[in-house]
Each structure stands twice: as structure tokens, then as C-alpha cells.
């Protein structure tokens, strides 16, 4: 089976500094995958590389077996990728419904868009109640819900979520995670979650990767990572050598 | 009542212009300084199609919409797209340059003279609720209203309209929804320019006179209206346009037609002083302005060995012997313009503020010195010193409240003050002789020596320029210069080190304006005649182009810049008519290809080139392993 998303030997630079070192990563159909790591570990760069916001110097990104490394972000969205950006980034001055419709920008089927809209309202009744409300006036949890709904409007096969629990109250975090696994189960959409909050996000994930200073330090099934003491260390960025793949890079220390 | 109606009619055309300004600002965070030129081209093209080709009104409007829409796309393509991810402030200079190019091209094509716009409608009057409507006014109102409604529907009801709003609110998030942000920006230029073109035709019909030079004023009216309503807010643009139109109509009915400019500039400056966010805009909108100074950070002034400087200085002095009086008079003017541009080395180069109205300070200096010498019969030296002082004081006071703002707002405020000063010179005839200007300004006289001959004046201006260049160079390396550099590179970081950015920006502007004032005194004495028309926007452009060409932070650069920009067209007369076109084209090319100027060593690659270079390096590195 070809993976939905596949990163092969990706090296990404910002200016003179290398942010990603030979990153390999896969997301299969229907999977929830976690990408974990602390600050400056390269999580967001990996996300940007997947979305086509930065281009890797070497290595390939493929979607459903097609090499999309040189594709623009818009083309990747059309091909079935969707994004829930960091800090949600809903369009605050637009209504909930307008936000959702914007998520369907790449689609051309008017009727399909309207029925997707209905599906989203069914899945998230809270959004239906507030469809005429300005998105900026909603709470953080509701905005996260809207950002997720907006991403689903493009009928994606894979949704990439950048720190979906950031800045939310603990009780809301649980709700958001529940919402993710619920959508995954109901619609069969794969989800790639980039998170600092390792334990919570692994609790809903199938598999996980741990990034450390731009390298994939550990990877494996969610349960094995949860049980692995070294994951915690790697995630905290402690100097202890973790796993065979981990190499400490001098320039980032 | 009739005045109110006249105000609403002209206000609705301002609103059309302001809509374009606000739309582009909202979507791209760019103030399109070429917008006025687009308006003027719309007006001229409308005149051409209507009077030369004899098209009816509806056909005129369609042709103009098509042409200006295309023009908008071209502006985006040549002034915005090549900048890539360079800071939006670079676009300020490129659009400004494109505006100059368009204005001057239009003057070459259509001729600079004022044309009579044909009456495309039968005149009729009807009276309703005490308002007397002319058919013309009704059509203008109707067309404007149709444009507002069409734009509002497009923006709120269509997919592309939503994409435009989404891009305006958060372009990165919009991109991640698959919205092609660059194409949306191009579309906003197309729509905005078409609106500007329509406004051009309407204004042409309303005043029945058009000329290619109306663009600058219309552009400023558009900025003033958009700023008044709140930059980036479309509803604000309409409100701002109407308020400005009504205010002008009442002002003109009380103080006469020349008050129009004063009101526009006054509104622009006043809004930036009191409520820069405008009526409907949010004040913190200003905070989203990216850092200004880093754009020119790509180079470092060249330094020469002392003997090399000495050789250059000798070359400058020795020119006196072989050269004719004509060349020497031109040469004095070159050095005066260089001194004028040196004022921007401090403000723009050291402190990182893009000032677009420096001709204002030059005008204050020229008028101060000229008035003191002719009316009060002061000798040259005290007049010269007073010129610098007065220029500094007035400029600082007028622009002072703007320094808490950044980027575009500073540029717009200085553009407004510069034009305001020229308008004042025109509107205070008891002091300045109004449009007739001041004649018979005496030549400089120092310690009893009259500096009247061409060689003497040449050497005198050269000496003053060299002295100021040395002073400015020293200033750049001083503690103060480093403080300015800190403010320029990162205002927030500077502020958190205990520096008060507004005070230092103001100080830079004050010193710069003093230098411009000194240059103004020399200018008055060199030409012996001054009038308000000399101190227009073109002169401010010249100063900016000189420093950009020479190198923003290199005091030596102004010499190089002034030689190329003033001496060359002066010597090759065929170029003379095209010189402003040439300035615009050069400014555009420089900002895109060599932002660090000529007198600079490339220190590091511009930041927006890092990523592609790195990719190449990584590839090369891998292959060599």
C-alpha cells in the first residue's frame, strides 16, 4: 500500500542554517500520526515542508505516491492535503460560514460544497449555531473547531494540524483531541498532528515520530512511544543520547 | 445645499480613488503610490477616446476600465512581483517610481497641456427636495454608486471576494487554504486600478479639464480619504472620500479654489496626527507594519584611502579651470542637489525612515533665506544659518506626531507635509508673493567678498558640500549614528535597550531638514529666483533617487548620485525632457536590482535571496562529497 504522505530524506534550510536533517516520515490512510518535539526541534519546518511553504534542498515529498516536492501549496491542497495552521488563524473579521466556505476555495463543485457545509454543521453543531457570528469573537476552543472544519471543507485525505492544543485550557484540550479522533473515525480522514504535548496527543494517535534538533530521533507505535522513557528525554531535548538514529549536531547546541 | 451636493459629487470620486488605495493596502500591505498616475491615465485616455475618437460615454468607460485594469496588472508585475519576499516598504519606492514613469510617459504621449474634456452628456437640470441636480452630477453619482455596490457584492458574495478578504486578514492562513495569494494581490491591483481609471473619467467630465499632471493631487486626495476612513477598510474609504469632498467643497466656497490643496494635505496630516487608524480602521493596524530599515541593509559604504579622497577633491576643484561658465553653473546646481540629498542620508540612510516630501524643507530654507535677504536685507551668512534653523524647526513640528508610526505612515505624512509647504507658499501671497515668486535674490557674500562669478559659486558650493559630507560621515560613525542604526534595524529591540525611537527619528529628521534648509538657501542664491512650483513632488523624488542611487548610508554617495542624475541630463540636453521618466526608471531598477546603491560594497546577500542560494550551495556541497 502506498502511503498517503511520504517524506524521503528531506533536508531543509533557512538561510545558512539547516533546520531538517534527512527526515523520513509516512502517514498511511486513516491513520493519526503524531510528530513530537520541543522548541526549535524542526516540527514547524516539517509542517511547512509538507505544505509546500518551504522547499527542501534535497529529498522528496510525495502525496499518494506522486512526487509533489516542486508543487505550490495551492496545488497540494487541491490534491487532498489540508492545513489547520498554528494558533488556528481563523479569519477573524469573517463569519463562521464565510470561513468554512474559504476552506473550500480549491473546489469547483457548488453543490458538493454546500453538502460538505451541511456535513460540517452536523458534525459540529456549535458552528451551525454560530454561522453568522464573526469568527474572531469566538472562544479558543470554538476557533479550533472552526479551523478544523475549515480544513475539512476541501474534502482532504490528510489534515495537517500544527499544535492544535496550544493556548487552550486543559478541559478544552481533551475536547479538541476527542474531536480529532472522532472525525478520523467517522470520515476516515488521516491526521498528522504536530505537537509539544506528547502524552495527550499520543493517546489518540496510531503512530508517532520524535524530532530532535532537526533529526527524527525515535519513531514507532503510539503505545511503544508512550512506554519509552527515552521519548520523554528526547522530547525535552536533554543531552542524553537517544536511540541509534539520533546524532547531536554541534551548530545547534 | 448646492455646495453640499458639489461636495458629495467630488467626494464620490475621491471615494473611488480611496477604495483602490484601501483595497491594495488591505490585501498586500502596500500603499500603491502609482495610484494617482493610474487615475490621470484614466482621465487622459478618456479624453482621447471621447474627443479624438468620438466614442459615447458608455464606450469611453469600458475602454478606460479595460486599459487601467491592464495597467494595474502591469504595475503589479513590474513593481511588486519582482520584489519577492522583500519587505513591503520596498514596494513603496517601486510603486512611487512607476507612478513617476507613468506620469511622464503620459505627458510625452498626450502632451503636458490641459485639455478640454468633451461634454458627453446633454446638460439638463432638475430640482428635487431643494437640491438642484445637473445630469452630469447625477451620472457621476450614479456611476460611483454602481461601482460601490458592485464592489461590495463582489467582496461579500463571491468566492473570489472571500479569497480577497481572507488574504487581507491573514495571507499565510489564506495560502494554506489553497488560495493563490500572489494572484489575489494582482487581482486587487487590477480592480483598484480600474476604479481609479473610472474616477479619472468622471473627474475629467466634472471639471471638463484634464492634464497628465493631475495624478499626484488625485493620488494624495485618495490617500487622504483612505487614511481618514481607515486604511484597509473599504467602507471607510467611501466615508472618508465623502467627508473629504464635502470639507473641500465648503472650504473652496469660503477661501477660494487654492484652498483645496491645503484642505487635502491638512486632512492627511491631521488624521495621521490624531487618529492614524482612521474613522473605521483599527489603530493597532499600524503595528503590523514590518521593519523599515532592514531593506537597505544589504551594503556597506565604500571607503577610500585618504589620498584617494584628496585626488577626488582636487579633481572637483580643478574642474574650475577648463570648464565654461555654463558647466560651472550646472556644477554648482549639482552640488546643491547633492547637499539637499545629503539630508536624506541621515533620515533615510542612518535612521531608516523613507521621506517623500523633502522638497518641503528645501522650500522653507529657500524662502527663509530669500525673504530675509530681500525684504529684511540681512546679509547672506545669517540668512543661510536661519534657513537651516527655520527649516528644521518647521519640519520637525509638522512631522513630530508621526514618529510613533512606522513605514508607510511616515512616508505618507512626509509626502503630505512636503506638499503642504508648497501649497502654503502658494497660498500666503502677503509673505511669499504667491505664484509670482521672489525675484532678484542676492548672491552670497562672505566677509565682504561677493560670490557672484560662476567659478566662485562653483567652488563655494563644492566647499560647503564637502564640509557637510565630512560632518555627516562623522555623525554616522558616532554614538548617535549607532543609536540611529539601532532604531533603523529594530525599533522594538532599540526601545527595549532604553532608546526612545520617536525622539531619535525626530532628531535625524531635524538635522536632515536643517541640511535641506541650507541647500535651499544656496539654491535661492544660485538661481536668484524662486517660485512655489519649483518645490513640487519631482524635487522630492530627485532627492530620494540620488540617495538610493548613491547608496543610502554613504555620504559620498550623494555626489555620485547627483552627478549622474543632475549633471548628465543637464549636459545632454536631449535627455532633459525625459529626465523625470529616467529618474523613475532608475529608481525602480535600483530598488529591484541593487538596493544598496552604487557607492557601496555588497556585504551580504539580501535576505530574500538566502533560501535559493542555500539550495544551490547544498546541491553543490552534496555533489562534491
Image (cartoon, grey):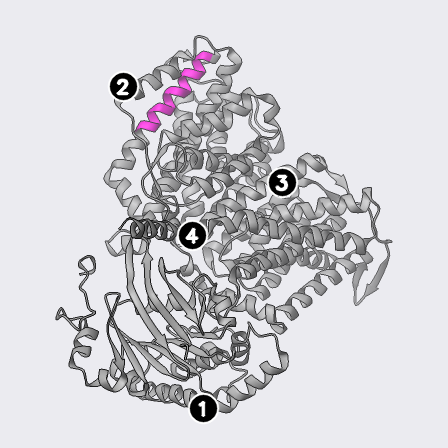
Q: Which residue is mark 3?
A: B103
Residue mark closest to the camera, 3 vs 1: 1
Label 1 Cα crowd, 10 Å radius (few <14 / some 14-19 / many 20+): few
* Residue depicted at 54% across the width and 37% down the height: B585
Q: Position of residue B257 (x, y in %)?
A: 67, 44
Quadrant location of residue B463? top left
Q: Nearer the viewer, mark 4 or mark 1?
A: 1
Q: How would you rate the neighbour count of disc 4 (Cα within 10 Å): few for under 14, some for 14-19, many for 20 or more?
A: many
Q: Same chain for marks 3 and 4?
A: yes
Q: Say which element carries label 2.
A: helix
Both labels 2 and 1 in a single chain: no
Residue that badge 4 annotates: B87
Q: Closer to the camera, B153 or B368? A: B153
Q: Magenta segment: does it hold B583? A: no
Q: CA distance from mark 2 to mark 1?
A: 81 Å
Looking at the image, which residue is at 25% across and 87% down?
A223
Q: Is residue B328 above or below residue B435?
A: above
Is B467 included in the stretch rendered in magenta?
A: yes
Amino acid at each position: 500500500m502506498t502511503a498517503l504522505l511520504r517524506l524521503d530524506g528531506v533536508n531543509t534550510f533557512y538561510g545558512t542554517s539547516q533546520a531538517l536533517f534527512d527526515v523520513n516520515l509516512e502517514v498511511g490512510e486513516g491513520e493519526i500520526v503524531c510528530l513530537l518535539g520541543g522548541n526549535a526541534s524542526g516540527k514547524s519546518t516539517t509542517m511547512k515542508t509538507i505544505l509546500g511553504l518551504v522547499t527542501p534542498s534535497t529529498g522528496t515529498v510525495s502525496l499518494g505516491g506522486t512526487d509533489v516536492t516542486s508543487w505550490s501549496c495551492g496545488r497540494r491542497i487541491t490534491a487532498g492535503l489540508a492545513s489547520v495552521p498554528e494558533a488556528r488563524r481563523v479569519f477573524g473579521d469573517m463569519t463562521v460560514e464565510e470561513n468554512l466556505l474559504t476552506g473550500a476555495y480549491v473546489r469547483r463543485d457548488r453543490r458538493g460544497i454546500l453538502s460538505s457545509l451541511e456535513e460540517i454543521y452536523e458534525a459540529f453543531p456549535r458552528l451551525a449555531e454560530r454561522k453568522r457570528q464573526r469568527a474572531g469573537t469566538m472562544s479558543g476552543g470554538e476557533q479550533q473547531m472552526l479551523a478544523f472544519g475549515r480544513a475539512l471543507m476541501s474534502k482532504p485525505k490528510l489534515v495537517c494540524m500544527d499544535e492544535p492544543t496550544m493556548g487552550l485550557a486543559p478541559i478544552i484540550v481533551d475536547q479538541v483531541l476527542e474531536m480529532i479522533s472522532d472525525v478520523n473515525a467517522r470520515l476516515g480522514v488521516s491526521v498528522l498532528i504536530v505537537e509539544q504535548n506528547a502524552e495527550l496527543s499520543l493517546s489518540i494517535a496510531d503512530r508517532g515520530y520524535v524530532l530532535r534538533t532537526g533529526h527524527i530521533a525515535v519513531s514507532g507505535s503510539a503505545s511503544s512511544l508512550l512506554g519509552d522513557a527515552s521519548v520523554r528525554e528526547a522530547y525535552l531535548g536533554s543531552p542524553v543520547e537517544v536511540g541509534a538514529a539520533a546524532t547531536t549536531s554541534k551548530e545547534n547546541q | 445645499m448646492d455646495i453640499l451636493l458639489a461636495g458629495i459629487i467630488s467626494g464620490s470620486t475621491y471615494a473611488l480613488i480611496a477604495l483602490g488605495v484601501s483595497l491594495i493596502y488591505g490585501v498586500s500591505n502596500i500603499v500603491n503610490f502609482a495610484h494617482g498616475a493610474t487615475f490621470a491615465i484614466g482621465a487622459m485616455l478618456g479624453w482621447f477616446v471621447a474627443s479624438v475618437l468620438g466614442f459615447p460615454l458608455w464606450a469611453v468607460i469600458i475602454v478606460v476600465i479595460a486599459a487601467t485594469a491592464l495597467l494595474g496588472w502591469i504595475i503589479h508585475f513590474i513593481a511588486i512581483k519582482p520584489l519577492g519576499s522583500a519587505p513591503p516598504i520596498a514596494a513603496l519606492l517601486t510603486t512611487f517610481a512607476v507612478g513617476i514613469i507613468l506620469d511622464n510617459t503620459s505627458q510625452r504621449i498626450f502632451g503636458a497641456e490641459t485639455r478640454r474634456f468633451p461634454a458627453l452628456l446633454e446638460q439638463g437640470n432638475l430640482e428635487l427636495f431643494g437640491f438642484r441636480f445637473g445630469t452630469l452630477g447625477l451620472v457621476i453619482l450614479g456611476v460611483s454608486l454602481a461601482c460601490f455596490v458592485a464592489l461590495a457584492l463582489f467582496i461579500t458574495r463571491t468566492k473570489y471576494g472571500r479569497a480577497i478578504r481572507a488574504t487581507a486578514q491573514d495571507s499565510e492562513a489564506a495560502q494554506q487554504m489553497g488560495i493563490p495569494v500572489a494572484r489575489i494581490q494582482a487581482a486587487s491591483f487590477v480592480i483598484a486600478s480600474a476604479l481609479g481609471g473610472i474616477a479619472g473619467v468622471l473627474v475629467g467630465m466634472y471639471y471638463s479639464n484634464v492634464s497628465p499632471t493631475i495624478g499626484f493631487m488625485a493620488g494624495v486626495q485618495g490617500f487622504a480619504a483612505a487614511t481618514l476612513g481607515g486604511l484597509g477598510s473599504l467602507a471607510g474609504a467611501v466615508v472618508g472620500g465623502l467627508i473629504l469632498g464635502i470639507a473641500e467643497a465648503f472650504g473652496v466656497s469660503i477661501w477660494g479654489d487654492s484652498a483645496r490643496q491645503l484642505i487635502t494635505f491638512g486632512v492627511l496630516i491631521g488624521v495621521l496626527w490624531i487618529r492614524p487608524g482612521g474613522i473605521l480602521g483599527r489603530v493597532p493596524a499600524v503595528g503590523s507594519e514590518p521593519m523599515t530599515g532592514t531593506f537597505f541593509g544589504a551594503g556597506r559604504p565604500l571607503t577610500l584611502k585618504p589620498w584617494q579622497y584628496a585626488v577626488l577633491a582636487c579633481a572637483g576643484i580643478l574642474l574650475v579651470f577648463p570648464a565654461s561658465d555654463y558647466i560651472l553653473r550646472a556644477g554648482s546646481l549639482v552640488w546643491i542637489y547633492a547637499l539637499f540629498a545629503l539630508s536624506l542620508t541621515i533620515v533615510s540612510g542612518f535612521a531608516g525612515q523613507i521621506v517623500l516630501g523633502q522638497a518641503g524643507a528645501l522650500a522653507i530654507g529657500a524662502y527663509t533665506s530669500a525673504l530675509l535677504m530681500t525684504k529684511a536685507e540681512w546679509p547672506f551668512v545669517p540668512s543661510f544659518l536661519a534657513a537651516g534653523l527655520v527649516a528644521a524647526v518647521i519640519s520637525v513640528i509638522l512631522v513630530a506626531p508621526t514618529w510613533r508610526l512606522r513605514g508607510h505612515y511616515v512616508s505618507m505624512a512626509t509626502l503630505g507635509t512636503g506638499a503642504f509647504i508648497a501649497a502654503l507658499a502658494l497660498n500666503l501671497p502677503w509673505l511669499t508673493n504667491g505664484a509670482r515668486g521672489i525675484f532678484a535674490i542676492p548672491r552670497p557674500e562672505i566677509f565682504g567678498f561677493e560670490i557672484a562669478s560662476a567659478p566662485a559659486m562653483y567652488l563655494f558650493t563644492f566647499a560647503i558640500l564637502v564640509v557637510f559630507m565630512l560632518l555627516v560621515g562623522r555623525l554616522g560613525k558616532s554614538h548617535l549614528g549607532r543609536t540611529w542604526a539601532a532604531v533603523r534595524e529594530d525599533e522594538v529591540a532599540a526601545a527595549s535597550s532604553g532608546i526612545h525611537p520617536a525622539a531619535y527619528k525626530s532628531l535625524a529628521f531635524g538635522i536632515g531638514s536643517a541640511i535641506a534648509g541650507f541647500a535651499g538657501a544656496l539654491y535661492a542664491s544660485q538661481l536668484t529666483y524662486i517660485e512655489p512650483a519649483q518645490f513640487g513632488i519631482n524635487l522630492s523624488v530627485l532627492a530620494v533617487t540620488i540617495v538610493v542611487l548613491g547608496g543610502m548610508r554613504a555620504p559620498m554617495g550623494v555626489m555620485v548620485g547627483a552627478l549622474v542624475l543632475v549633471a548628465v541630463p543637464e549636459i545632454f540636453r536631449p535627455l532633459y525632457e525625459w529626465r523625470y521618466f529616467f529618474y523613475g526608471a532608475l529608481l525602480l531598477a535600483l530598488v529591484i536590482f541593487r538596493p544598496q546603491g552604487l557607492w557601496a560594497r555588497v556585504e551580504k546577500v539580501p535576505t530574500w535571496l538566502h533560501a535559493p542560494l542555500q539550495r544551490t550551495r547544498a546541491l553543490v556541497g552534496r555533489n562534491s562529497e
